[in-house]
Image (cartoon, rainbow, N blue to C red):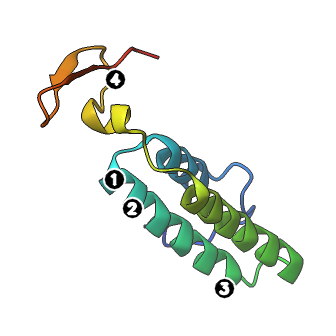
C-alpha cells in the first residue's frame, strides 16, 4: 500500500502514484487491484498530511480519485485479448470448435 510517511510534494515525483497509475493501465488483475489499493492509501495519506495546504491535499487526493475513475470507465478487454492475453499471435481453439488468431500489437 502507500508508504508510511505522507509525501511532501503530493503527485509530482511520487513514484508510488506513478507506478500505481501505470499498473492500472497495464497490469494483471492482482496488480490492478494492488494499484487501486495504493491510490486509495495515497489519497488518505495526502488528505491527512498537515504539512501541505488544504488546496494541495485536495488536489492530490482528487488526482488519485480521477485515476481510479478513469480506470473504472475503461472498457473490458476484448474477446481476443481474453482468449490470448499475451497477444503473441498464436491461435487458441474456442469452445465451439472455431479458432481465433490474435495478431501482435
Element class at badge 2: helix
> Which comes sooner in the sequence, label 4 or label 3?
3
Q: CA distance from mark 2 to mark 1?
A: 6 Å
Q: Which of the pair 11/7 is nearer the observer? A: 11
Is residue 56 shown above or below 68?
Answer: below
Q: Is residue 54 left or right of residue 73?
A: right
Which residue in the protein does label 4 denote? 87
Q: Nearer the viewer, mark 3 or mark 1?
A: 1
Q: Secondary structure at mark 1?
A: helix
Alpha carbon of mark 4 to alpha carbon of mark 1: how far?
Answer: 16 Å
Q: Earlier in the sequence, mark 2 or mark 3?
A: 2
Position in image of residue 14 (x %, y %): 64, 53
Residues at marks 4 and 2, CA–CA distance in whole angstroms:
22 Å
Of tags 4 and 1, the one toward the viewer is 4
Labels 2 and 1 touching (C-beta < 8 A): yes
- Residue annotated with mark 1: 29
Q: Nearer the viewer, mark 4 or mark 3?
A: 4
Residue 45 badge: none
Which label belongs to residue 48? 3
Local SS, label 4: loop
Q: Residue at 70% across / 73% down in the picture?
A: 61
Q: Which mark is residue 33?
A: 2
Residue occupying image coordinates x 35% and y 38%: 79
Image quarter hosting the N terminus:
bottom left
Amino acid at each position: 500500500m502507500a508508504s508510511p510517511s505522507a509525501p511532501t510534494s503530493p503527485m509530482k515525483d511520487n513514484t508510488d502514484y506513478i507506478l500505481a497509475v501505470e499498473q492500472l493501465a497495464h497490469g494483471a488483475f492482482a496488480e490492478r487491484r494492488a494499484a487501486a489499493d495504493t491510490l486509495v492509501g495515497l489519497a488518505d495519506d495526502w488528505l491527512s498530511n498537515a504539512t501541505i495546504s488544504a488546496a494541495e491535499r485536495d488536489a492530490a487526493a482528487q488526482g488519485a480519485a480521477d485515476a481510479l475513475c478513469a480506470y473504472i470507465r475503461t472498457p473490458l478487454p476484448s474477446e481476443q485479448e481474453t482468449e490470448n492475453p499475451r497477444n503473441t499471435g498464436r491461435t487458441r481453439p474456442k469452445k465451439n470448435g472455431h479458432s481465433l488468431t490474435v495478431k501482435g500489437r
